[in-house]
Amino acid sequence: MEDGKPPLKLPYNVSQNPYDAATKFIQDNEAPITYLEQVANFIIQNTQGATIGQSQAQQGGSDPWGSENRYRPDQPSTPSVPAPPPKSLPQKEYLSILVARVPTIQKKIGELSQALVAGGQKDLGLSPSETTTLNTLCKHLDDSGATAKSQNVEGGLDLIIKLVTTWPYKDRMPGLDLLRLLIVAPDTAKFDHPGGNIVDLLLVGAIETETPAENHVMMATRAFANLFASSEGRALAVKEFEKIQDTVSTAIKSSTNRNLLVAATTVYINYAVLFLSDKDNASFEHVLAIVDTLSKILSSQADSEVIFRALVATGTILYIDDEVKSAAKDVYGIEKSISTALAKATDPRIKNAAREIRELLK
């Protein structure tokens, strides 16, 4: 995927649709959707002849691009009736952003610690016991594929909070990166600290200066997305909605940082899934705040992945009820925003999602 870097693992079971596996691989590694055909063809070429519980007809599967017109040399050339595009709305599962090179993060923290000590800030540098804790924590995260549901490392979270809140602002990025991995654990979501809950600590770490670094805010936004991995995290996300929404919506107003925008739209997808699954506790004011922000994203952004995720969030939240749909149409002009996004899009996923939303709004 990147010159000079080791190849990425592409997990695949032969019972899967190659296009589904390729789409997940691209999303997990935040790669451009334009790689889809190349990745899918790689899977097909390297698994030819392997079938488990599938007939030959099943192996083709549905095409996530929305058509069955791709070339298959093993099939007759007789035209077939295109299958209907797969339905993408409403989204029902929470999304996380957990891809990470933990050893690289660990190495960077060690280098920064040494620099602090050399610069006369020994109290901020890692002590031998803290270095041991960091090594154990990073091994735990690396071995679990950065998806550990529990920290399992005594003192690990306390150490990361130190890096995020007491280190010089410019040096906090690696600590924020580890915290967004740890935040999937229920214990992190419930973490109690004199400086506040985990959302408060993320905000201190990411936006403590007058002009926050965009990548610091991006990493905090990824953490907000990962907060939805546990029920404890989801409860905190609802409780701290105003803080999260204010931070994210402010950060993306004039941003062109793709990583930040993908993280932000992932946060909104997760809020949409949560509000749809628990309508009784979904604040109408919070729902409309998300609709407003999504409308602005669709009108202003051009990146296909950002637009697609914004459409998935929009379509999901519109399923809540007719009142939300009416407000989206009449107050926030969501139909115009969708048309603006479509004018810039070539990705068939975007066209299919937009079509579903327009049918929902009829």
Image (cartoon, helix red, strand yellow):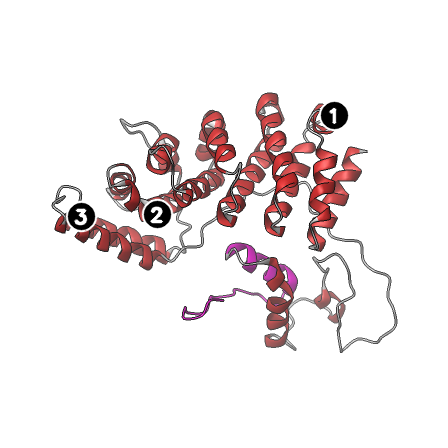
- Residue type at tag 2: Leu
Rendered location of residue 61, percent (x, y): 72, 62
> Of tags 1 and 2, which is closer to the observer?
1
Q: Earlier in the sequence, mark 1 or mark 2?
A: 2
Predominant secondary structure, magenta span? loop
Residue 20 is one of the magenta-drawn residues = yes
- Residue type at tag 3: Leu
- Residue type at tag 1: Asp
Residue 278 quadrant: top right
Mark 3 element type: helix
Residue 271 quadrant: top right
**Which mark, residue 330?**
1
What is the tally of numbered marks visible in this picture? 3
Mark 2 element type: helix
Residue placed at 69% from the left, 55% from the top?
347
Residue at mark 2: 178
Residue at mark 3: 116
Left or right of residue 18: residue 182: left
Q: Earlier in the sequence, mark 3 or mark 1?
A: 3
Residue placed at 74% from the left, 29% from the top?
329
Q: Nearer the viewer, residue 102 or 212?
A: 212
What span is in magenta? Answer: 1-28
Q: Is residue 229 above or below residue 331?
A: below
Mark 1 element type: helix
Q: Residues within 10 Å of mark 2 (few under 14, many from 20)?
A: many
Q: CA distance from mark 1 to mark 2?
A: 42 Å
Residue 47 quadrant: bottom right
Q: Nearer the viewer, residue 93 or 301?
A: 301
